[in-house]
Structures are given as C-alpha cells and as structure tokens.
C-alpha cells in the first residue's frame, strides 16, 4: 500500500522533471526577464486636451509651436462672411526644460491676452513592481489683459488699466485602459480685477473634468467640462464645455472641437465665458488647435 | 523497493537537468537595432536589453525582448512606436525561436543559417537569418542583420506618413553569450 503510494509520487515527479527538461527555451527566457516597472505613456496625446492642460508634459528639449484658432458667427442678419464672422488666434510657444518641467507663453489677438504657464509633472502613473495608479501634474497659469471689455460685456471696470489673472491647477489623471483616460482638475482662479460695484468674487473655485477615448491608432475623441463653484454675480456666465477629436500626424497634433469658450487663458475662460453651450450663434465656437513638436535635443541611439 | 524508488526519484530530479544546462548559453544584454531609411526621415532605435538563450546540444535558439526598451532619437517617436504602431500594451514582447541549421560546434568562426519563427506585434512569421557565430574561450558571439517588411506584421502606416516610414525595416543584432547557470 505504502509502496504503491510512493510510486504515485515518483511518477508525478518524473512527469514534472521531464517537463523541466523538455521546456522550450522561450519559456526559460521568460523567467530571465527583469522585474521592473514602466511609466504609462500617452494618457493624453497632447499637452492640452482642447481648452485646458492635460497631465502630459513633453520630454526634455521639446519645443512646441502652437496655433489655436476659434471661429464663430455673429447672430446678426448682416453676417455675410465666408465660413465664420470672427476668429481668435492664440500663438503659443512651450519649452520642456526637463522631462517633468515645461514653461510656455502665448498671445491671443482677439482679446489681447498675454498668458503664460509653468507645468510640473509630480507623479507619473506606473505599472509593474512599482505601482502608481495616477499621474499628477501641477499647473500655474497667469494672464494679463490689455483690452477693456474682452467679451463685449461689462466684466471689467473701464478704469482698470492692469488686469491680471491667475489659475492654479492640480491635474489628476488615470489611464484606465489602453483606450480610455480620465482627468479631474481642482482649480483655484484668482483675478486682480473685480468691479467694486458688482461685488464679484476675486477668487473662484473650479473643477475641470476631462476624458479621452481612442477611436483609432492615431485619433481619439476628447471632452472637457469646467464647473465653477462661485461664479461672477454681476453678469451671467456659463460653465465651459468642449467636445472634439484629436489627430496626431507625426510631429503635428491637430485638435478639432466645438465649445462655448472663446478665450484661451484658464482664468478667463473658466470664470468669464458669457455663452452657454448650444448651436445658436454666437454661442457655438469651432476650434482648431495645431501643435508642432520640435526636438531640440536628441537621444543617443548608439 | 522503497530505497530504489527514492534513489530513482533523486536521480530524475537532479541529474538530467544539470547535464542539460551545460550546453546552454545566455545573453542578457543583447543588442537589437532597427533602421527605417526614407528620403524624408531616418528612424533609428536600439534595444540594449535583449535576452537570448542558445542550446548547443539541441542546436536551438530563443530571443525575447521588451518593445518598451527601445530607445529612439526623438522621444515622440518612442511614444508613437509604442502607442500607435507596435502597441506594446497589447504585445509587450517580440520573440524568436529557431534552430541553428548548419552549425558545427567545433568551428571557432562560421556563418550559419538560423531558421525559425519571429513573432512581432502578435504576428508569427517563418524566417531564415544568416548569422555569424564566433566562439572565443567558450563565450559565443552571434551577429547578423536581416530585413523585415512592416506589413508582414500587421503594422499599419497611415497614408499621410507613408513617405516618413520605410516599408521594410533593417534589423541588426549582436548577442554575447556566457555559459548559463540556473
């Protein structure tokens, strides 16, 4: 009885040892693969989702030249222009000083806003032996407006000559799967210009939600929604919404979207968007962002 | 009866596997480089962490590499390669398994053909690769190059970028093997 039992075990071991010897080399190699982790890439394809920043930063030495355009029609019957009555363009320049730190400046011709930002990637989502479930990026933007009545309504005290605005953002994003990414951004907006008479708050709290879904190897659909907890009281403002398509073509990223936001500076469009999102003129804005990435520093391959 | 069985057991567990390993050699830092030459743009990438095992008794070879370990000149190329072309989240590895067809253990330097299956982007393809095999003090060195067609591995290049990426990719490899001890 005991011997029989032993032979059972013996035959089991024989099978196992035969398996080890007959194991193919590829399986043997799998055991030799290093136990490491890797950073999640491409949570979003671009450093911008459409309106606001994404958690992504470019690698060291990357220079981004960007041209953002937004077109809309005037509601008047005299509107006879081809395609669009009005256009606002932001000319932007970003430079990645390190893999984690990027700074950028821009100028918008329609509202005469000069804006800039500092962006630092604090944590990057990782997979493997070192797990980090989310990516976190800090963004600080600042803007200066030299035009009175940027949105053709009475946000501004006409006597104010210096109007600064700041937005501090904490971008928290997760690439949930290979196609789908989500981002939430608690934002603090601070405006130096507040009309004394209107009793408008100078500090606003906003939450920006964003998502992207890949629909092809080079294309993805994106959406963004900005909620402001304490909006301006003196004028009706609306939360911003954007839906669009991102398309990458080599070194060029093209973003097409529809939105109700007219301005590009974070502090301005989050708190001072005077149009609700709908398809009536002048509320519907068609946006085209084109970004060209130039690598000023190249990795050594040899 | 029990004792015999026990001895047999010991023998089967320890002996054959050890004997087997004597003929195995491993390369842990193999190099694979690929080039895509077009008139518009040259793309070059290198992987310095390629794993390979050769079994001289069975005349077999296996190669395994992580696609994420490729280093590109431009960082954006790395992202595009992994995200849009190779899809390294779905197919993290490229593997090769084959036989050294006309290999002679006694020669110090020889050109041998390796025939086997190359798997990239989840697509397996039969290939034959001419390889230079050198043996110096029981350390083997394998070098060679071959050409792979992009479309064979179901890697699609958008029409707008067809002038930037070559239809055939030039691959070079270099492995330095040491005796493999488990």
Image (cartoon, rainbow, N blue to C red):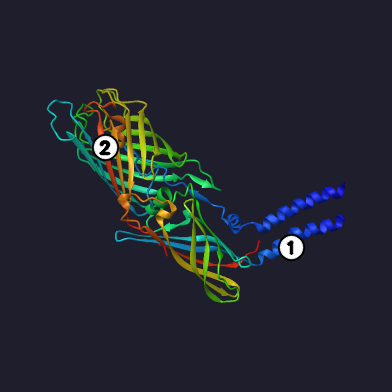
In whole angstroms, how far apart are the C-alphas of marks 2 and 1? 72 Å
Q: What residue do we see at 68% from left, 59% from top?
A: A21
Tell which of B106 and A212 is nearer to you: B106
Q: Determine whether, in the image, residue A285 is placed left or right of residue B154.
A: left
Residue B12 position in % (x across, y down) = 75, 59
**Neighbour tally class for label 2: few under 14, some 14-19, many 20 plus, Cα within 10 Å:** many
Res B139 quadrant in image: bottom right
Q: Disc 1 marks which residue?
A: B15
Residue B104's label in the rendered image is: none
Q: Determine whether, in the image, residue A65 is placed left or right of residue B68.
A: left
On the same chain, marks 2 and 1? The answer is no
Tell which of A103 and A250 is nearer to you: A250
Residue A287's label in the rendered image is: 2
- Callout 1: SS: helix
Q: Inspect this view and state whether residue A293 appears.
A: no
Q: Determine whether, in the image, residue A11 is placed left or right of residue A190.
A: right
Residue A100 position in % (x across, y down) = 41, 49
With respect to residue A117, does A154 lie above or below?
A: above
Q: What residue do we see at 28% from left, 42% from top?
A: A289
- Callout 2: SS: strand
């Amino acid at each position: 009885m005991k011997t029989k039992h032993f032979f059972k075990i013996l035959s089991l071991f024989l099978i196992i040892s035969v398996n080890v010897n007959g194991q193919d080399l590829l399986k043997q190699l799998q055991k030799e693969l290093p136990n490491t982790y890797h950073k999640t890439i491409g949570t979003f394809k671009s450093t911008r989702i459409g309106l606001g920043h994404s958690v992504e930063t470019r690698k060291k030495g990357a220079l981004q030249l960007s041209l953002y355009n937004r077109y809309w029609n005037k509601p008047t019957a005299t509107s006879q222009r081809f395609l669009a009555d009005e256009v606002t363009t932001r000319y932007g320049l970003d430079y990645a000083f390190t893999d984690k730190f990027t700074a950028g400046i821009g100028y918008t011709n329609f509202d005469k806003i000069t804006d800039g930002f500092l962006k630092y990637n604090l944590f990057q989502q990782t997979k493997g032996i070192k797990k980090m479930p989310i990516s976190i990026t800090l963004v600080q933007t600042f803007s200066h407006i030299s035009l009175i009545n940027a949105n053709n309504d009475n946000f501004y005290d006409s006597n104010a000559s210096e109007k600064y605005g700041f937005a501090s953002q904490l971008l928290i994003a997760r690439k949930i799967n290979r196609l789908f990414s989500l981002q939430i951004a608690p934002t603090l907006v601070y405006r130096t210009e507040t009309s004394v008479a209107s009793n408008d708050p100078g500090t606003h709290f906003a939450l920006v939600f964003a998502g992207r879904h890949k629909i092809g190897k080079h294309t993805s659909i994106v959406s963004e929604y900005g909620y402001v907890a304490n909006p301006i009281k003196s004028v009706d403002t609306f939360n911003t919404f954007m839906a669009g398509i991102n398309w990458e073509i080599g070194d060029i990223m093209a973003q097409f979207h529809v939105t109700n936001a007219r301005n590009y500076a974070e502090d301005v469009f989050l708190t001072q968007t005077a149009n609700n999102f709908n398809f009536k003129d002048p509320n519907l804005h068609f946006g085209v962002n084109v970004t060209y990435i130039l690598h000023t520093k190249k990795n050594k391959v040899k | 009866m029990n004792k015999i069985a026990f001895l047999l057991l010991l023998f089967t567990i320890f002996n054959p596997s050890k004997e087997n390993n004597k003929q195995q050699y491993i390369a842990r830092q193999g190099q694979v480089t690929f080039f895509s030459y077009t008139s518009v743009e040259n793309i070059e990438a290198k992987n310095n962490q390629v794993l390979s095992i050769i079994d001289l008794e069975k005349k077999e070879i296996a190669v395994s590499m992580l696609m994420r370990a490729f280093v590109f000149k431009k960082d954006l190329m790395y992202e595009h390669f992994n995200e849009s072309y190779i899809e390294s989240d779905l197919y993290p590895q490229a593997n090769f398994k084959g036989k050294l067809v006309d290999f002679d253990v006694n020669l110090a330097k020889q050109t041998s053909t390796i025939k086997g299956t190359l798997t990239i982007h989840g697509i397996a393809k039969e290939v034959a690769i001419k390889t230079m095999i050198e043996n110096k003090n029981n350390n083997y060195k394998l070098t060679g190059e071959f050409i792979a067609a992009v479309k064979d591995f179901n890697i699609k290049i958008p029409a707008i970028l067809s002038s930037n990426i070559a239809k055939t990719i030039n691959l070079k490899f270099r492995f330095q093997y040491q005796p493999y001890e488990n």
